[in-house]
Amino acid sequence: MAAAALSRFGDAEALPFIREQVGVADGETARTAAWILARVGDASDIPALRAGRDRYDEPLTKAYFQHALAALGDAEGKAALVRNLGHEDPAVRVYAAEFAPDGRVVAARETLIARLDDEVPDIRIRAAHALLALSMPKK
């Protein structure tokens, strides 16, 4: 997380370090790096994020990569995010709702509305937030 903060404020070594972490074997480290790239990365990170998506089978880790792709404007990532809003794993649904505004995934609107009735309170809250954020003009 320190590398994320340093990267956001222009540290020349932080972003390359984060990009390296996307390729590590440890899924938790790699998915955290993907989450960071969703916020500070750019289109040049899409190939590495696609490789990460294809490398992991664990649903939450794969979802982080899909959602990071969505945040960077990748059409496949956006479609996966919409699908993940209906995933059986509540953690995947939580993070799909969390990432929806980052990629301006307006195609998720109807599914987010349905998530307002999810049995998991965190999902309901994040879906409501996502709908509010998506209703605002893009910054």
Image (tube, rainbow, N blue to C red):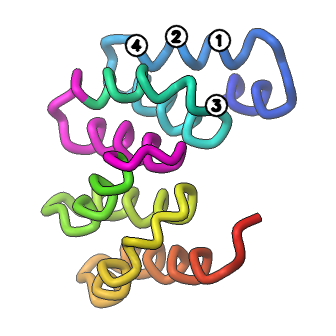
Q: Please name the amino acid that badge 3 sits on.
A: Met
Q: Please name the amino acid that badge 1 sits on.
A: Pro
Tell me the quarter of the picture where residue 132 sits.
bottom right
8 lies above or below 82: above
**The disc label shown at residue 16, or none:** 1
Regarding mark 4 in the picture, which secondary structure is present there? Answer: loop
Instruction: Point out the frontmost of discs 2 and 3.
Output: 2
- Stretch of the chain drawn in magenta: 54-76
Q: Please name the amino acid that badge 2 sits on.
A: Glu
Instruction: Point out the frontmost of discs 3 and 4.
Output: 4
Circle 4/circle 2 CB separation < 8 Å: yes
Looking at the magenta stretch, what is its main secondary structure?
helix
Q: Please name the amino acid that badge 4 sits on.
A: Gly
Circle 1/circle 3 CB separation < 8 Å: no
Residue at 38%, 71% in the rendered image: 107
In percent of width and height, residue 29 lies at: 43, 23
Regarding mark 2 in the picture, which secondary structure is present there? Answer: helix
* Mark pair 4, 2: CA separation: 6 Å
* Mark pair 2, 1: CA separation: 6 Å
Q: How many marks?
A: 4
Q: On the picture, is 90 further left or further right than 64? A: left
Residue at 65%, 12% in the rendered image: 16
**Mark 3 Cα shell of 10 Å, populated few (<14), some (14-19), many (≥20):** few
Circle 2/circle 3 CB separation < 8 Å: no
Residue at 24%, 82% in the rendered image: 119
Q: Which residue is mark 4?
A: 23
Q: On the picture, is 136 further left or further right than 10? A: left
Q: Which residue is mark 3?
A: 1
In percent of width and height, residue 43 lies at: 57, 32
Circle 2/circle 1 CB separation < 8 Å: yes
